[in-house]
Amino acid sequence: MPIVIGAVAPHGFPIIPELSDDAEGGLATREAMLTMGRRFKEAELDAIFVTGPHGIRVNGAISLADCGRAAGTLNFEGRSIEMNFPLDLELTNTIAERARERGIPVASVGYGGSNPRQSVLPADWGIMTPLWFAGHDTSVTGGGYVLAGLLGGLPETETGAPAVIANPSRMIPKQANVEFGRVVAEVAQADSRRIGFIASCDWAHRHDPNGPNGFHPDAKRMDDMVVQAIKDNQPARLIDLDDEFISNAAIDGLWQLLMLAGAMEVVPMEVDFLSYEAPTYYGMIVATYAPRG
């Protein structure tokens, strides 16, 4: 079955309602993410492929989580949430196998136990934030962090679809991320289940001179360009972005978006652009995708 729904989603975790009342000014983003979440839940997914920039990265290879579960905690201004959710090992391994057959550099990453089904990946905010909205908002534990999957504290009932977690590499040609996205879509087509795709992306991180990365005028230029490419339903054209421009703007979403662009070459999709804002020092975009026809 083709990928049935896709999204570009931010991962600034104050947009999660349980962590912040005002979303650090990103209330439009929060509302857009709630809309995205409703659409993902209505899609009744059997698995969600999610790619983000902040997890375990491997130099020179796209990493795939070769673990049975992922678990993590997010803390913000005295509040916290926990998540503990299953990973789809079969789908992960099929994607890895097909990618290697195409010559795409892929690394299968384990954590903890040597048996993948008994391993629990530390989940980061780049993965947890979009998955919270996409059905894992009640995938909580009472038992802490990574070892919850082994030592108790598992959710009494699973909520949300099992995930496949991938992290791109900035050290391989950008085109390799496009090709990897094609592989993900082709594997989904050969699978009978309903599979979603989330590109977890934040954009320019240099909008505010008081922010951790300082200010650069290329930040606004970059975000304007990305917004237009997504609105035009042509994310693949961003592959030609200049490396200096990328560095000046300090984006972290390009590589994940290129994976989605590759998937769209296999499954043509129409975009619904929901929001853009940069309430603090970084830009956030929310858009959902549905197959044509």
Image (cartoon, rainbow, N blue to C red):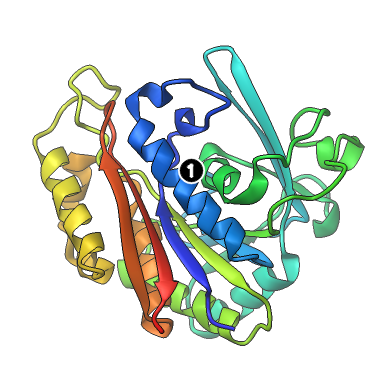
User: Which residue lies at the image location 49% right of the left edge and 21% below the top edge?
Assistant: 20
Which of the 4 quarters of the picture holds residue 11?
top left
Q: Is residue 36 left or right of residue 173?
A: right
Residue furthest to the right? 152
Compared to 273, does 275 lie above or below?
above
138 or 103: nearer the viewer: 138
Compared to 109, does 97 lie above or below?
below
106 or 279: nearer the viewer: 279
Quadrant where the N terminus is found in the figure? bottom right
- Residue type (three-letter) at the residue carrying disc 1: His
Which residue position is annotated with label 1?
54
Q: Position of residue 152 (x, y in %)?
A: 91, 36
Q: Is residue 110 visible?
A: yes
248 or 274: nearer the viewer: 274
Residue furthest to the top? 78
Where disc 1 sits, the SS reads loop
Q: Is residue 52 visible?
A: no
Q: Position of residue 59 (x, y in %)?
A: 47, 54
Q: Position of residue 137 (x, y in %)?
A: 65, 40
Q: Is residue 26 left or right of residue 127?
A: left
Q: Position of residue 62 (x, y in %)?
A: 50, 62
Q: How many marks?
A: 1
Compared to 152, does 251 lie above or below?
below
User: Which residue lies at the image location 55% right of the left edge and 66% below the top edge?
Assistant: 196
- Mark 1 is surrounded, within 10 Å at the Cα level, by few (under 14), some (14 to 19) or many (20 or more) other residues, namely some
User: Which residue lies at the image location 59% right of the left edge and 61% below the top edge?
Assistant: 42
Quadrant where the C terminus is found in the figure? bottom left
Q: Is residue 292 left or right of residue 125?
A: left
User: Which residue lies at the image location 18% right of the left edge and 66% below the top edge?
Assistant: 240
